[in-house]
Amino acid sequence: MTAEEQTSEGQHTIPMEGEDITPKKDGELPMTGDKVFVHYVGTLLDGTHFDSSRDRGEKFSFELGQVIKAWDIGVATMKVGELCQLICKPEYAYGSAGSPPKIPPNATLVFEA
């Protein structure tokens, strides 16, 4: 399976690997304000690694509704134990400001969570 990303240079194919996370009928979804704990690896679209909770050995904890929009939307669809790949357009991540020094302006981000 691949995901297509349109860039100014043309199409960029991102290989997707992992487990099938077809939603299960059991388990609750988190709601805005719920505290969640997530392991993730973050890269730029070109594969440049910028952050990883796995490298730190501690899950990232946050309240749903208090992080970048892509995470609020994506994590809200997940149940405990599921894995996903989030491909975040700049407007759902850090936008034109980026998050210097590791995330440049208008960067598309990829998270394995």
Image (cartoon, rainbow, N blue to C red):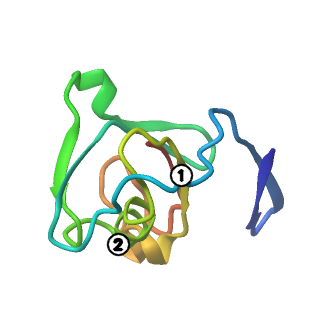
Q: Residue at x 21, y 42 (%)?
A: 60
Q: Secondary structure at mark 1?
A: loop
Q: Amino acid at mark 1?
A: Lys
Residue under label 1, please give it. 24
Q: Position of residue 79 (x, y in %)?
A: 40, 52
Q: Quadrant of the C terminus?
A: top left
Query: Which residue is at the front of the view, 87 or 98?
Result: 87
* Marks 1,2: beta carbons within 8 A: no
| Mark 1 or mark 2, whichever is nearer to me | 1
Can you say whether 59 is above or below 69 in the image? Answer: above
The image's mark for residue 97 is: 2
Query: Which residue is at the front of the view, 100 or 14?
Result: 14
Query: Which residue is at the front of the view, 105 or 38?
Result: 38
Sequence-first tag of 1 and 2: 1
Q: Residue at x 63, y 44 (%)?
A: 46
Q: Position of residue 52 (x, y in %)?
A: 34, 33
Query: Which residue is at the front of the view, 78 or 42?
Result: 78
Q: Amino acid at mark 2?
A: Ala
- Considering every residue shown, the one lying at the far right of the view is 10
Q: Secondary structure at mark 2?
A: helix
Q: CA distance from mark 1 to mark 2?
A: 37 Å
Q: Position of residue 94 (x, y in %)?
A: 37, 68
Q: Residue at x 23, y 35 (%)?
A: 59
Q: Quadrant of residue 3?
A: bottom right
Q: Quadrant of the N terminus?
A: top right
For this view, does 13 lie left or right of residue 63? right
